[in-house]
């Protein structure tokens, strides 16, 4: 009896503990968050899985009134689902019609090759009648989509007009083609504007860098930068004026360096004169005067070196 009582008390204690744990679990388990359901449904819709997105929102809102966000999102998803379903069905219509239309020449040849087999002619007639009924559906497809999906509308129209030359469909095709031309022109204009904007930014950036180089005294680099600007923008007046100023300043520097080298040369400072003229040549690699002076100085240095070697050999061999 005591054993049974102990077992009952143990069972009762375990039941109470388990119940407390369940209560605690219910307290700590967070309720579904509306934002999470919305975010998840939007992710599903973005992948074209509208049915799952709608089901998720319906399930998340089962125990409470729909909020404005839920209502708008559900309505949007249902509209998108309907549109996608229509487009896919119409693509299927185009595919089936094209396949059936491709059978016409084969069936025609069969009826001509075997006129004694009437079932070929009957099949040809059935195919033609089916295509005529499809022509109406294709026309409806074109008019249904022309405001929201130009490409699909045009595909439906092209096939519909190949089956029957309907005046209203022809007018719609002309309208779509005009829209397509206008769209291409608008895209080309936008692309041109984007390229011009990038080009202008690049020119402005290079010009700003050239000005910085001028201000820091790096005239050789500034000249190179300005030439690059003018290569892309030959009529850039700012770059032209700045380049002219840089060239004038460089010309003065070169003249001063050439004169300084001449003075050093006359004073017998051949190496120093050569280095000075080389500095001038660095500023303008096309300056023939500096190049000739350097060559002359080098010849003098070579002659002096040969003379030194001759004198040295003469001293060793009296």
Image (cartoon, rainbow, N blue to C red):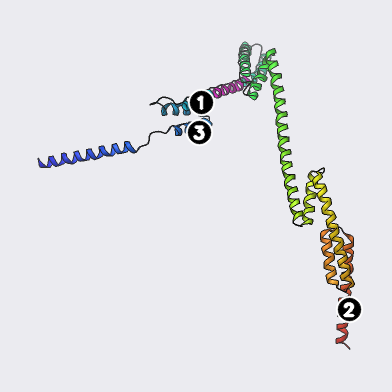
Return the residue at label 1.
Answer: 77
Q: Position of residue 146 (x, y in %)?
A: 64, 20
Tell me: 211 left or right of 287. left
**Residue lying farthest front?**
215
Return the residue at label 2.
Answer: 307
Task: Estimate the spatial distance between the alpha carbons at disc 3 and disc 2, rounded to whole Å.
Answer: 90 Å
Q: Position of residue 95 (x, y in %)?
A: 61, 23
Give the secondary structure at mark 1: helix
Residue at the image point whose x is 72% and y is 22% from the top? 178
Residue 43: which disc?
A: 3
Q: Inspect this view and state whether residue 86 appears.
A: yes
Identify the image quadrant of residue 156: top right
**Is residue 96 part of the magenta span, yes or no?**
yes
Q: Residues within 10 Å of mark 3 (few under 14, many from 20)?
A: some
- The front one of 42 and 117 is 42
Residue 95: which disc?
A: none
Residue at the image point whose x is 84% and y is 51% from the top? 244
Tell me: 154 left or right of 72. right
Give the secondary structure at mark 2: helix
Quadrant of the drawing holding the C terminus? bottom right
């Amino acid at each position: 009896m005591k054993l049974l009582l102990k077992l009952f008390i143990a069972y009762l204690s375990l039941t109470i503990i388990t119940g407390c744990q369940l209560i605690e679990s219910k307290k700590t388990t967070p309720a579904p968050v509306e934002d999470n359901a919305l975010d998840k449904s939007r992710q599903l819709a973005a992948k074209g899985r509208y049915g799952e997105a709608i089901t998720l929102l319906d399930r998340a809102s089962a125990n409470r009134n729909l909020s404005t966000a839920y209502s708008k999102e559900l309505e949007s998803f249902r509209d998108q689902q309907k549109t996608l379903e229509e487009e896919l069905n119409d693509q299927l219509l185009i595919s089936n019609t094209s396949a059936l239309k491709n059978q016409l020449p084969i069936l025609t040849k069969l009826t001509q090759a075997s006129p004694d087999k009437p079932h070929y002619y009957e099949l040809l007639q059935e195919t033609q009648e089916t295509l005529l009924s499809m022509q109406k559906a294709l026309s409806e497809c074109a008019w249904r989509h022309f405001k929201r999906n130009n490409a699909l509308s045009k595909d439906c129209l092209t096939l519909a007009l190949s089956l029957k030359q309907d005046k209203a469909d022809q007018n719609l095709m002309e309208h779509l083609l005009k829209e397509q031309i206008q769209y291409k022109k608008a895209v080309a204009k936008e692309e041109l504007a984007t390229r011009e904007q990038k080009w202008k930014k690049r020119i402005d950036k290079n010009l700003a860098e050239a000005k910085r180089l001028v201000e820091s005294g790096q005239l050789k680099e500034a000249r190179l930068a300005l030439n690059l600007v003018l290569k892309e923008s030959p009529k850039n007046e700012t770059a032209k004026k700045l380049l002219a100023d840089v060239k004038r300043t460089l010309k003065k520097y070169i003249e001063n360096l050439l004169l300084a080298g001449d003075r050093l040369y006359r004073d017998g400072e051949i190496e120093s004169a050569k280095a000075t003229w080389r500095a001038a040549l660095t500023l303008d690699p096309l300056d023939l005067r500096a190049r000739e002076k350097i060559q002359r100085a080098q010849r003098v240095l070579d002659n002096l070196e040969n003379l030194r070697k001759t004198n040295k050999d003469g001293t060793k061999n009296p």
